[in-house]
Amino acid sequence: MDTSDVLRFVAQICNLPYRRIAFGRRPSTQPALKPGGRYRLKIRATAVYKSAPGIFLGLAIVALPETSWGQRASNWRAYRMADGMPESACVAVSVAPNGKVVARHFGAASFSELDGYNITVQPSPPGRNRIYESPGGQLWTVNPEGLQEFKDDAWIAHSVPELTAEFRAGVARLSDSVALCPVRQGVVLVALTDGLFEFNADRPEHPRTTLLRRAGQTGLEKFTGMIVARDGGLWIAGARGLAKAPAPVRNLKPESEWQEYLAPATLGIQNLREPHEDAEGVVTTIAESSGNRQNLVVHFDGLHWTTAAVGAEKIRHAWRGPDRTSWAITATSLLQGEDGRPELTENDDIAARQYYDVAVEPSGNFWLATSDGLFHYSMLTWRSPRAVKDVGSLVHCLAGDKAGQLWFVAGNALHSLQN
């Protein structure tokens, strides 16, 4: 009696359905055993059976019906103390041009740097502002006294009178953090409410600050935020719209020509802030309604402006992720929306008590700094197209035609999908 007969015999005893399973190159052709018969079971001495329950578990899996649903893969990866961080809670996060991620922690006086393989923990100065990394790996942050540079395992303070004056004057800022952009060794751009400045410390004994553009020189009236554009330029958010500084930002001069994109008066929006650019070049910001002062999510694709109302939700950040999905965070919730649908609904894939910050990668994948860890969202390599996400039946067969359409049978219907 071979292995196939053993499986059949056990299935009959356990009253389980049995289908022929081929072992080796040829399936067994011996007749099935009959209930009530007497048979001799010979087990070779070389066979090792570690656990009888394990055998029956394996047989039960074999005896499952022909079709079953696999476990859904997750888009999320969480980083916490168990992964090597000094603390799970993170209050700020940024993504460097070299792909490294820098997360600042809530209570621990340290920050974590993720390079895709390891987590490196270093000391951080007081404060909760983002820590930015230059293309060459230089780290910068801001405090009320000026800028701070991480050098030789220590934070070095640099006085920036314009930055200090804004903090001391108590200028009302729409953003929680002063936006920085390290562009090369010893050089960092600083976006303040009244202007864009370049701080240059390539000669540490003689640092200097240069005004690149006064906010009053633009139609934006005041600056509220800044990000590096996909093409290497610079997006500036302001009270009345957006401005674009040309690439490369390391060569930005006071005479450089900017492009301004003022929001149409018919939209009734003001105080755009926290800009994020997606993989298709669409800039998403938060804005205020000129009428009721409620938050709006604003998208600008270079030509057209669109807005989406979010009611009384106090949005901290809004952005577009992969596959044109819309995302936003409030202090206590993560919101998600589909392309073409203005409403945002709560996403319960992850659970965090507080959401503090977001950093968006050029691909649209993003990082969330929360009270319960640092979360990374990325698109799966294998995923269902958005056009067929509502198809819940099994796909029995599929084929492609010369025109590039994909045809498949699911349930009792024939479907076609055009890329």
Image (cartoon, grey):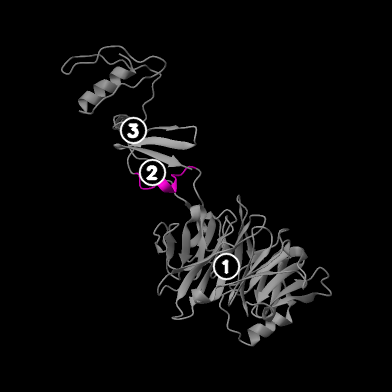
Q: Amino acid at mark 3?
A: Gly
Q: Secondary structure at mark 3?
A: helix
Q: Which residue is drawn at the image coordinates 46% and 80% (left, top)?
A: 293
Question: Is disc 1 in contact with disc 3, using a CB cutoff of under 8 Å?
Answer: no
Residues 268 and 318: in front is 268
Q: Amino acid at mark 2?
A: Gln
State how far apart marks 2 and 1 are (Cα).
36 Å
Magenta segment, which residues? Answer: 382-391
Say left or right for 356 vs 49: right
Location of residue 359 in the rendering, given as x and y in whole percent from the top left corner: 56, 62
User: Of tags 2 and 1, which is closer to the observer?
Assistant: 1
Q: Quadrant of residue 227?
A: bottom right
The residue identified by callout 1 is: 275
Location of residue 168 in the rendering, given as x and y in whole percent from the top left corner: 65, 86
Question: Which part of the image, by quadrant, shows the N terminus?
Answer: top left
Which disc, if any, is residue 54?
3
Residues 199 and 339: in front is 339
Say left or right for 32 vs 115: left
The residue identified by callout 2 is: 71
